[in-house]
Amino acid sequence: FFDLKRIMEGRWLRAAIALLLVSVSFGFYLPGVTPVEYEPGDSVTIKVNSIKSVRTAIPFDYYSLMHCRPVGQGAIKADVENFGEILWGDIIKPSRYAANMKVQVGCAKLCTTKPKEKDPSKISRQLKKLKTRIDDEYRGHLILDNLPVSEVYIWEGRKEALYYKLGYPLGVPGNKTRDSLVNNHLSFTIKYHKPDSGIPGFRIVGFEVVPYSVESGHIEAHCKQGQDWQPESYPPQTVVFQPIAKATPHITWSYSVTWEEDVETAWASRWDHYLKSADASNAKIHWFSIVNSLLIVLFLSGMVAMIMLRALHKDFNRYNDPDNEDEAQEETGWKLVHAEVFRTPKYHEMLSIYIGTGCQLLGMGIITLIFALLGFLSPANRGGLLTAMLLLFVLMGSYGGYTTARLSKMFHAQSWRTVALTGVLLPGQIFVVFFCMDMLLWAKGASNAVPFTTLLALFGLWFCVSVPLVFVGAIFGYKRPTIEHPLSVNQIPRHIPEQKWYLRPPVTVILAGVIPFGAAFIEVFFILSSLWLNKFYYVFGFMAIVFVILTITCAEISIVMIYFQLCYEDYQWWWRSFMISASSGLHLFLYCIFYFITTLKISSFWSGFLYFCWMFVASYIFAVMTGTIGFLATFVFVRKIYSALKVD
């Protein structure tokens, strides 16, 4: 579709490739925004984020529970920065917690909250909701100077290593013999660092918390500034909503702040603690995955080399040798279908649409990965990755429209209807699933339920930017010369011999898709953990290597399988070249089912429904991307081998 030779000669591409290789080698990231210096006594803002749980995968607003609200505020407005935060469910709001640089707070009372129930004879819905969230293992999330709060544990199995777990538990789940406990006292430890080069002030490099459950009466009696405060020495605060006579009458909330100087951690490396605590930081597992994938690639490369150097070279010599005319007339193998191989396939319009959309997705994925390697999409930039993917998919619409137009013109089926479907088919299918999930999240009161205004903005991006760009790309594609096939096609289709069971499409497609998925499944585990277990994923250098290996694997397995298919005189290769690699999306979805059963602790039906809906969308997108890679590689391969034949 493009003149790759001319493009590769460009200096800008060589410079970009060199920069990409440097990024992969060092895997650096930008750890946040511009640093902020605080003088002693300066106010430091503590904000709250949504509460989240790995048991339900449905986030909720922090103030949906009986927490202390900021003084003098009615409806608390969220600090929304980008689309990604909204879609991900991050609702960041101001809090009542107060801290000042290097000012120690022994214990400070926040407020006392009481269940608001009009009829005292009925069960308190607020207490019931709080107990439910605690039993579902929800965790509260606070933010200080763009750093998330975390609990710190000693990492067993690693010498002198600490494990940072994001957030803090709202309480201790109860059971039939024990009431649930609420963590109503938070003991903060804020670490600061004195910058070098004579810069005045101090920078915050750590934000840790130890939650405690303390009976409200003891907080009211003993939580005073300057008084010795030992929260672990008091009985815990239970959460009881029935029987009504024993229901919790009120909950008193408090906190303490301890400032510690950290001379070893610089501001630029303050995120390292969180990133090293993620499972994805285990480099040995990643290298094992890469070595495993490279072995698969070497095996497939050997098969492709054998086909190209032995079988094809031998066939070319026999078919094109003028001294062997009698032998050449006895056509066998893949040459026998030379007059059928470029016959327009059934449903060629849908094939053009899927390949165009696949190129749009590939463009989005490659550019997003480059930005991630350069550090612009670090975990410190909340919602940045999702926002970048959404915007890049919209902007890559011209690439998708161009590819669809080139294929449609090659099939002699130019149609603006095909172009329009390229812009709306896959996004429309995803939107239907997304809308159904959004209605469910609205019914549940989840914080990641997309508001109506955001839906309108997404519609605007889709129909006012993406679809027009698809048509712009198609205009340029239709203006390009038609892709001519190297061989003509017979008017009457040739009969396809009966194929053996292991060469039939269901068998070859499903079995061949295992190989591309096998090249990437270990990395898939870490990605799923970051999505559903509230962990960071930042090793984009490893992801880039796995993506390259996955691309090569998809291309080679499609070429090998289509070559064997042509050797058995089955010339219907167009759709199969797409489906062979695309079936890896089916294996991805099956692995998601396995991951759900073996790793996740989701027990709610609706939470499971949301999980499988999102994983279906992800698997579908993965299938379209990998199928496009397989089709394009096979398309180039088939044109090359048949253009080398001398046919009268």
Image: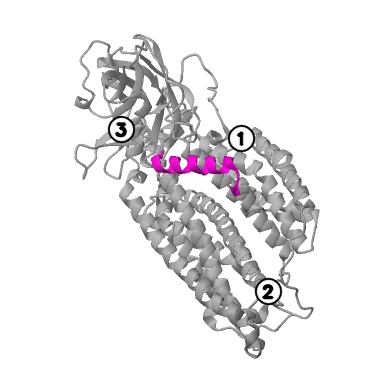
* As drawn, 610 above or below 77: below
In the image, which residues are magenta?
Answer: 8-27
Magenta stretch mostly in which secondary structure? helix
* As drawn, 457 above or below 496: above
Q: Quadrant of residue 639?
A: bottom right
Can the viewer see residue 589?
no
Of 388 and 473, nearer the camera is: 473
Task: Give whichever of discs 1 and 2 has the lower sequence position.
Answer: 2
Position of 215 with respect to 159 (left or right) is: right
Task: Give whichever of discs 1 and 3 has the lower sequence position.
Answer: 3
Task: Give whichever of discs 2 and 3 has the lower sequence position.
Answer: 3
Disc on res. 451: 1
Q: Where is residue 248 in the image (x, y as percent from the top left)?
A: 35, 29
The nearer-to-camera label among 1 and 2 is 2
Given the image, on which type of amino acid does mark 3 rest? Glu
> Image point 27% across, 19% down: which residue?
261
Q: How far apart are marks 1 and 2 (CA)?
A: 51 Å
Of 130 and 502, nearer the camera is: 502
Given the image, on which type of amino acid does mark 2 rest? Val
- Outermost residue on the bottom side: it is 326
Q: Badge 2 local density, few (<14 within 10 Å), some, or many (20+)?
A: many
According to the picture, the residue beneath numbered tag 3 turns out to be 151
Label 2, secondary structure: give it. Answer: loop
Query: Are the two marked residues, 1 and 3, in contact with CB atoms closer than 8 angstroms?
Result: no
The nearer-to-camera label among 2 and 3 is 2
Q: Is residue 422 located in the magenta-colored stretch of the structure?
A: no
According to the picture, the residue beneath numbered tag 2 turns out to be 341
Can the viewer see residue 88?
yes
